Image (spheres, coloured by chain):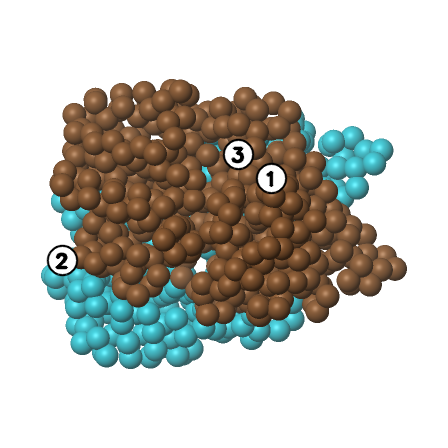
Chain colours: A cyan, B brown
């Protein structure tokens, strides 16, 4: 095991009706609230009314900012910062999925930074102070509700950047699985792929001895794979929504990397390149790229892919090479994602090899990407070529 | 799944050499430190010197209190409270195992309470304020380093009481597995039984749908059972010490009950009765009682024992009744603990049926005990009788 710190300050309120905790949280957080949300689905599914009811009961002064995009944009973050400053906001309340929360995180650290918040996102400056942030999650996917990570896209530069700060943990997050029953099929599937990908990125570590965390990661994957088909056959089932929702949080709240080197994450960098150029859904991009990253890397070292194949996909290794077992596991993962209806080729989004060099370039927003296997421009290009058709 | 809050404020520094974090923690915690420890083993194994080195480098003013007992006593807590008050202590630093930490927790809430801290321990009063607490763990067992629970024994009344408070979480805990390499065989085994028992208590819940937590609990048990024999064959092995140490923390830091009813805990109550009358080691009492609690309860409802038997002990259920599968699992657990050298009969401690009614009585320090099966005096007596010889 490697040395680590385990610490997560977010209060996670989970379960049906937990919205009632909002009043208690507001009693210490201050009265001037910026309500941040996305395209307005929360106005149709009743979540907006439930949140506003709590805010009114708390005599909060509410300023609204709607229209946060999937792949949230730096320009939207700038707008939020201005609203906070001119309205003396005490608390940002993000109601939505990972995009809304990620945008709110960037606003919260940007409010107290004199320069452009893009400096913090690109790690040129460090955040010293942040506005308090609370979240009401309406989409199970990114885990942003209980971590300090955010991803923002700068369309002036076609750059999609992940960043983190100890100040970016939500103070509280309220997760009511009933709020996710109206999430449509495609978003539900993208969320499932996203949370599974977060586990997989962490699973592809090179720490020799992390037996409990390996079992936890396998446990999250098995749980999601057991619940997902049941959920898709009955999208209103709150119990399966709850299982998926809590798995999504656990997949990426820091726990699963305790004692390991943190995992690989090259696939996420490659997907950020794709989304930065083509604005495709993150979960869709991951579903296409991840198995190809796995088969690329299994050619050098199939050890972790083999372990995954045996523990999660129940592949029998009798009489097979490690590489053969690994490939069977990768095929099983692909089949599972196919069975949910996730895309498996870039052609699905009309992407061909025309801008492939730009995609390679946009994957390298960090100086090195990949840890299970350190990527070069050639290896990234190979993975993208495998992903085309 | 049931509703829950997931929140744990303790900063857990884990790994070899993490003692260096103490200086950073002290920089914000204040300079007047009460150093609490037990029988003095930390003076022999180098931990005392390492801690004092950090304290001196931080220009801390250190007051020492040694001699905290296994099954720590109310009288010792009283003594600690007096020392804190008369020395204007800013931070209590507990260096030791669960007993030392539990004692320090009671001191930390007692300092600011005007009456007898026993009121807080018996839940007649609520703690409103506590001194800051840090811990340096030297024994993997109770999980006290990352939870808000403490167990104190009042020998005037022969009562051993568990209590908790939101204020009783350590602010930080430093876990260096190398500090546990000198723990002798019996204490190592008791610790392993204790942490496995914490998982088992939580595993015997009645929440219908908690698939991820079930897998996490099975994962902790499998990890401990894999590492324990390897550790006992090489007690100096830091890697296996690390695995066991982190499993012990994870077994009882709140995570494993997220979404469940919390589990049973009758066995712990029965063991507290035993320790309150005979002052036997907690882990020893648990090893004796738990399989007997399981076989008693499996007669009414073997469902969870069967699940444990199949997932953790690999029992095949072909052609067997649920009860038969459950019993095979219970036997496998007993065999595993036997293989470590844990006691399996009360006779091991010279306990016979002479004071059995007193033991039954002392098990009922709470109005109801048990949740998987609610205990009566008769059922507790039955479990104790099964445990005699």
Q: Secondary structure under badge 1?
A: helix
Between the residue at mark 2 and the residue at mark 3, the CA separation in whole angstroms equals: 58 Å
Q: Residue at x 76, y 35 (%)?
A: A324
Badge 2: chain ID: A
Q: Residues within 10 Å of mark 1 (few under 14, many from 20)?
A: many
Which residue lies under the disc numbered 2? A85
Which is more toward the observer, B221 or B163?
B163
Q: SS for tag 2? A: helix
Q: Is residue A155 left or right of residue B288?
A: left
| Badge 3 and badge 1 both on one subunit | yes
Residue under label 3, please give it: B187
Q: Position of residue B217 (x, y in %)?
A: 58, 51
For residue B211, side relative to residue A360 (left or right): right
Query: In the rendered structure, are the residues bearing label 3 and label 1 in contact, judged by CB atoms less than 8 Å apart?
Result: no
Observer-side mark, 2 or 3, equals: 3
User: Who comes first in sequence, dot 3 or dot 1?
Assistant: 3
Marks 2 and 3 on same chain:
no
């Amino acid at each position: 095991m490697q040395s680590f710190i385990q610490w997560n300050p977010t209060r996670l309120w989970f379960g049906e009706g937990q919205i009632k905790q909002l009043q208690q949280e507001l009693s210490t957080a201050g009265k001037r609230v910026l309500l941040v949300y996305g395209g307005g689905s929360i106005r149709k599914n009743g979540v907006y009314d439930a949140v506003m009811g709590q805010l009114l009961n708390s005599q909060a002064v509410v300023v609204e900012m709607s229209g946060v995009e999937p792949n949230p944009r730096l320009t939207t973050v700038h707008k939020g910062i201005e609203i906070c400053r001119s309205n003396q906001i005490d608390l940002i309340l993000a109601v939505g999925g990972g995009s809304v929360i990620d945008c709110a995180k960037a606003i919260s650290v940007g409010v107290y930074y004199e320069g452009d918040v893009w400096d913090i996102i690109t790690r040129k400056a460090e955040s010293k102070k942040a506005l308090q942030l609370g979240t009401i999650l309406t989409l199970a996917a990114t885990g942003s509700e209980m971590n300090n990570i955010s991803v923002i896209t700068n369309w002036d530069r076609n750059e999609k950047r992940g960043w983190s700060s100890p100040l970016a943990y939500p103070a509280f997050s309220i997760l009511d699985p009933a709020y996710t029953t109206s999430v449509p099929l495609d978003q539900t599937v993208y969320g499932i792929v996203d949370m599974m990908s977060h586990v997989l990125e962490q699973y592809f570590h090179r720490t020799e001895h992390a037996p409990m965390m390996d079992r936890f990661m396998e446990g999250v994957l098995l749980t999601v794979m057991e619940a997902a088909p049941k959920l898709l056959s009955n999208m209103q089932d709150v119990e399966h929504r709850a299982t998926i929702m809590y798995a999504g949080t656990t997949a990426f709240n820091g726990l699963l990397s305790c004692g390991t080197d943190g995992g690989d994450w090259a696939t996420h960098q490659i997907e950020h390149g794709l989304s930065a150029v083509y604005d495709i859904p993150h979960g869709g991009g991951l579903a296409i790229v991840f198995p190809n990253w796995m088969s690329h890397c299994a050619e050098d070292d199939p050890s972790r892919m083999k372990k995954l194949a045996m523990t999660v996909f129940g592949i029998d290794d009798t009489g097979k090479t490690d590489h053969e077992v690994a490939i069977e596991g990768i095929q099983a993962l692909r089949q599972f994602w196919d069975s949910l209806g996730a895309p498996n080729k870039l052609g699905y989004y009309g992407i061909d090899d025309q801008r492939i060099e730009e995609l390679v370039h946009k994957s390298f927003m960090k100086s090195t990407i990949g840890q299970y296997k350190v990527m070069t421009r050639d290896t990234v290009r190979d993975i993208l070529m495998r992903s085309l058709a």
